[in-house]
Image (tube, rainbow, N blue to C red):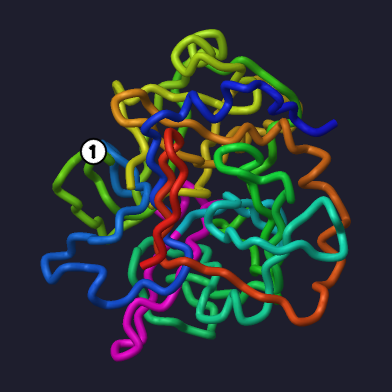
Amino acid sequence: MNPDFSSPNIIKIFFNLLLYTHLSQLYEDSVDTNGSLSYPVFRIVKGREAELSDVPYQVAFKTIYSYFSKQYITFCGGSIVTNLKLLSAAHCFNIKKKALCDDFIYVEGKALGNKYAVAGCLVNKDVYNPKDTEKGQWRSMKKVMYPAKYTFPKYDIAIVILRRPFVLNDNISPIPLASRYQDYSGECIASGFGQTTPIYSKLKVLAAHLMLASIELMKTKTCNQLHKSYMRHFICTSDLVADISLGDSGGPLVCHNTGDPNDKGKGVLVGITCGARPHNGSIFTRVSSYKKYISTNCADFTLLPNYIYVFPTLAIYNFYQLSVFPS
């Protein structure tokens, strides 16, 4: 059963919610010489540097940063489900076109050129390496699919299929998925690359290392009251302890000791980083709401010919008045 987003307040609740999404090439002039990012994207705030073994399920989606230095930079995060299948956010790969399977939008071919999924990597900027090393495994993406009903923040989930599987090891391994709805509380782990200042801060400091933080979760009732809407298909978090900020979009929210049948000591993936509302914490797409979608075989379909790809470099969403501003 698909999640029900029929509530008329589902858009209104994100009044002044700004989602800054980096969807295409990050040009060299997008980052200042002091390492500050001029194109804002969601990042971990008040976190600590991660070790490879802390979050072996973490994936960095990287795009070309400098053709001169051949460096790539992270534009979104993701999670390893199998050695060939990853999860991320739809807004990281958003286009406007349908494919053979009417329930889904597809992205493949040139739209994924100069973009890679990298596992076992701790750094934000790196040089492409076709060989697997202890510093990471780079994989090109065969296709990305996300729900045709996607309109941020609704249905903000994407499946990424790799052209070649990751070689699993202690530092690169799948994370089990939450199998059922649960009204979570306490702290869970969010991880991502980059900016360590809040989304409302004028200072945009780009970290060089993978960050992780314990984030305080809200009960669904509190989330409903805060956003004045039905939030069952989201997980809401507080920014009192730590938060996401600008670049972590698509990244994992993992909880431990939840009692979920899939939790075998590794924890379970409960959420996918969706967005943040200044001074009101963040929202994550609830993974258990999309069990049927994640397990679908529709990823085997191919695109219709003559696809037109629309990849704005920067999309800014304001849910009081929706606007998109390509760079």
For the point 61% across and 62% down, which residue is it? 95
For the point 54% across and 75% down, which residue is it? 138
Position of 292 relative to 65 (above/below):
above
Q: Judge left or right: residue 90 versus residue 104.
A: left
Q: Judge left or right: residue 266 versus residue 179.
A: left
Expressed as whole percent of the image width and height from the top left, the position of residue 49 reads: 30, 48
- What amino acid is found at the position of numbered circle 1 in the picture? Tyr
Expressed as whole percent of the image width and height from the top left, the position of residue 252 reads: 53, 43
**Quadrant of residue 264 in the image?**
top right
For the point 35% across and 76% down, which residue is it? 65
Q: Judge left or right: residue 116 versus residue 309.
A: left
- Residue placed furthest toward the front: 321
Q: Judge left or right: residue 1 versus residue 88.
A: right
**Quadrant of residue 166 in the image?**
bottom right
Categorize mark 1 by other alpha carbons within 10 Å: few (<14), some (14-19), many (20+).
Answer: few
Expressed as whole percent of the image width and height from the top left, the position of residue 241 reads: 30, 24
Q: Which residue is under mark 1?
A: 200
Q: Is residue 267 visible?
A: no
For the magenta stretch, what is the residue range? Answer: 51-75
Q: How many marks?
A: 1
- Residue placed furthest toward the left: 34
- Residue placed furthest toward the bottom: 68
Q: Is residue 127 visible?
A: yes
> In the rendered structure, does residue 308 fall within the stretch colored magenta?
no
